[in-house]
């Protein structure tokens, strides 16, 4: 018996079940929008930005705005993969002892003289134009679905322009456009967008030199897209690979570091 020969009510249920079965079959094959070529480009770009294994790096952040004195802060980051990070404040001295811990997409700050850690969001501002997730999340690969949007030539170099769409609302930015060199996979520029698709800030990747075993960008310039001449410059210093045991990335261990 065909579906067409069934009574109307039965036909409706049969077509509904058929549609649900078809959607389920498509879902089992993986994400519809996944682009293997874009994924490969993004992974290679991430490997240039940060090591895939455990590492330690000091980051000096200088934030400036019109008619204001420059604000300087220094952080030490211990990171293992894309899911385990400790961020320690080294300067200013008055804030030394504050430590952020990221596990997965959960982020807490531990403060001296406060018994319980405070929950934070990755998109919350850390300092200047820098969000918590800019330091705590090392890679784009785990947080975004990439696709190749277009190609451009920037200063004589051919670039892939990747559009990165957040896998959920728990990541740092809703949408990112990333310029990646076609010949070397080096990131050159990023634009960060809000949930309403408003450009929030841009980032330039500069100062390529050997660090942590390969050539990486050591200077990032983040510019506010909404406030003219508001920017933060991140300088990466003394990166070294480290075998970081899992116990470092636990609440109990952080109490020993304060």
Image (tube, rainbow, N blue to C red):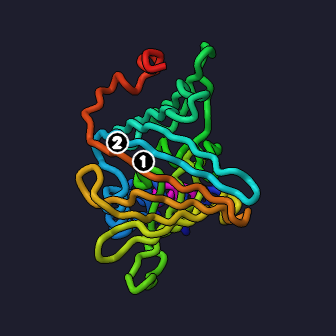
Between 114 and 31, the one nearer to me in the picture = 114
Picture coordinates of residue 202 (x, y %)?
Answer: 58, 65
- Count of marks overlaid on the render: 2
- Residue at x 53% of width, y 24% of height: 97
- Please give the range of residues in magenta: 16-22
Secondary structure found at label 1: loop
- Residue 173 vertical position relative to residue 227 in the rendered view, above or below: above
- The overriding secondary structure of the stretch rendered in magenta is helix
- Residue at x 46% of width, y 52% of height: 235
Upstream in sequence: badge 2 or badge 1: 2
Q: Which mark is residue 78?
A: none
Picture coordinates of residue 111 (x, y %)?
Answer: 59, 22
For label 1, the residue is 138
Between 70 and 53, the one nearer to me in the picture = 70
- Residue at x 38% of width, y 82% of height: 157
Q: Which mark is residue 81?
A: 2
- Residue at x 27% of width, y 58% of height: 210
Relative placement, left or right, of 249 versus 173 is: left
Q: Is residue 6 visible in the rendered structure shown here?
A: no
Q: Is residue 232 magenta?
A: no
Picture coordinates of residue 124 (x, y %)?
Answer: 64, 43
Picture coordinates of residue 125 (x, y %)?
Answer: 64, 45
CB contact under 8 Å: marks 2 and 1: yes
């Amino acid at each position: 018996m065909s579906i067409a020969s069934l009574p109307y009510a039965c036909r409706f249920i049969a077509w509904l079940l058929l549609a649900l079965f078809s959607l389920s079959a498509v879902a089992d094959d993986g994400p519809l929008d996944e682009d293997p070529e874009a994924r490969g480009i993004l992974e290679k770009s991430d490997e240039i930005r940060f090591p895939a294994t455990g590492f330690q790096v000091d980051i000096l952040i200088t934030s400036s705005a019109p008619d204001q004195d420059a604000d300087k802060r220094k952080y030490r980051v211990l990171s293992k993969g894309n899911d385990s990070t400790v961020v320690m404040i080294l300067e200013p001295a008055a804030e030394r002892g504050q430590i952020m811990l990221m596990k997965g997409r959960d982020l807490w700050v531990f403060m001296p003289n406060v018994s319980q850690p405070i929950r934070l969001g990755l998109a919350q501002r850390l300092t200047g134009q820098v969000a918590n997730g800019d330091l705590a999340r090392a890679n784009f690969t785990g947080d975004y679905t990439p696709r190749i949007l277009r190609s451009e030539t920037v200063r004589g170099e051919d670039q892939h322009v990747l559009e990165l769409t957040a896998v959920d609302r728990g990541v740092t930015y809703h949408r990112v456009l990333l310029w990646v060199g076609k010949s070397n996979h080096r990131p050159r520029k990023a634009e960060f967008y809000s949930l309403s698709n408003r450009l929030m800030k841009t980032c330039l990747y500069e100062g390529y030199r050997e660090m942590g075993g390969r050539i990486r960008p050591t200077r990032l310039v983040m510019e506010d897209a909404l406030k003219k001449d508001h920017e933060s410059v991140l300088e990466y210093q003394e990166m070294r690979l480290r075998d970081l045991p899992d116990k470092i990335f636990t609440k109990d261990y952080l109490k020993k570091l304060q």
